[in-house]
Image (cartoon, coloured by chain):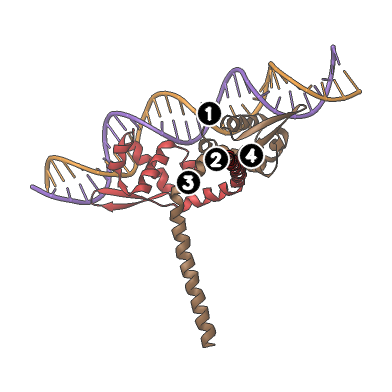
Chain colours: A red, B brown, C orange, D purple
Amino acid sequence: MPLTAIEALAEPHRRQILDLLNARERSVGELVGELPVSQPAVSKHLRVLRDAGLVQARTDAQRRIYTVRAEPLLELDRWLAPYRRHWARRLDALERRLDQIDEHSDDAKETA
Amino acid sequence: MPLTAIEALAEPHRRQILDLLNARERSVGELVGELPVSQPAVSKHLRVLRDAGLVQARTDAQRRIYTVRAEPLLELDRWLAPYRRHWARRLDALERRLDQIDEHSDDAKETA
DNA sequence: TCAGTAAATAGCTTGACAGTTATATAGCCA
DNA sequence: TGGCTATATAACTGTCAAGCTATTTACTGA
């Protein structure tokens, strides 16, 4: 059974792989050069990411070039949505405090 | 070592717990009533979520009331940010197509 | 065709984790 | 105090995932 995006990306090396591919497409060998694990380990991670729909491969001679497929991240983004109000509130509070500081610095200017 | 938010939330029951708590705060017993696992399993999940900073507990007599702490989700949200352009593009494309459809329906109106 | 390169798979080991039952801890109330 | 309720922890088990080395598969070019 393929993993969901969040399950696949719980593994740090897989997040790293996706980040690298999001910068630009890469061959397996290039990815191996960037990660502290063996080639078979990278291939296995790529398999998991592929099964989760997060990457796709294209063949170029004997290389396989991998690119990002971001669609499965939409579900994660949507799951996250109901939590955004929490930090939205926090940001509101922060902004209020910054406004206060602004007011005080105006006071300071006036008294200067 | 405490897990990161994404690692803690790879587990479906923990996502479910967080969703339940995001709707409203609950006691352990109430959570047990909503999940298909034993009370100790729920307590263990709550421990993991607590260690990850995703929930906090308050004592009410012999109950413990758990609430969401969303801050750790910010990191996940930020990680996700560079991928949003992918589906933003898709939405752009969709919008263009909808615009086209609109134009066509205008054509239809005009020729009607 | 054969040697060489690139990537995937096989087979194995190890450690972590989610679940269980049993037990401990803690607060309430008669 | 004693018994009840609520939750946490202990101890154990089975499964699974991530890593490795060795091997296979696939393609290239001399």
- Residue at point 62% right, 37% down? B69
* Type of the residue with mark 2: Leu
Q: Regarding mark 1 in the picture, which secondary structure is present there?
A: loop
Indicate which disc, 2 or 4, sits on the residue closer to the N terminus: 4
Image spot of residue D14 (x, y percent): 53, 30
| Residue wearing tag 2 | B73
Q: Regarding mark 2 in the picture, which secondary structure is present there?
A: helix
- Mark 1 → mark 3, Cα distance in angstroms: 21 Å
Question: Looking at the image, do the residues carrying marks 2 and 1 touch, with CB atoms under 8 Å apart?
Answer: no
Indicate which disc, 1 or 4, sits on the residue closer to the N terminus: 1
- Mark 2 → mark 4, Cα distance in angstroms: 15 Å
- Residue at point 50% right, 82% down? B107
Mark 3, residues whose alpha carbon is within 10 Å: few (<14), some, or many (≥20)?
some
- Mark 1 → mark 4, Cα distance in angstroms: 18 Å
Chain letter for the residue marked with disc 3 in the picture: B
Indicate which disc, 4 or 3, sits on the residue closer to the N terminus: 4
Q: Have a look at marks 1 and 4 and say if they share a chain.
A: yes
Image spot of residue D25 (x, y percent): 27, 46
Q: Which mark is residue B80?
A: 3
* Type of the residue with mark 4: Ile
Q: Regarding mark 3 in the picture, which secondary structure is present there?
A: helix
Indicate which disc, 3 or 2, sits on the residue closer to the N terminus: 2
- Mark 2 → mark 1, Cα distance in angstroms: 15 Å
Q: Regarding mark 4 in the picture, which secondary structure is present there?
A: helix
Image spot of residue B45 (x, y percent): 61, 32
Q: Is residue A110 left or right of residue C25?
A: left
- Mark 4 → mark 3, Cα distance in angstroms: 22 Å
Q: Have a look at marks 2 and 4 and say if they share a chain.
A: yes
| Residue wearing tag 1 | B2
Question: Looking at the image, do the residues carrying marks 1 and 4 touch, with CB atoms under 8 Å apart?
Answer: no
Q: Residue furthest bottom?
A: B112
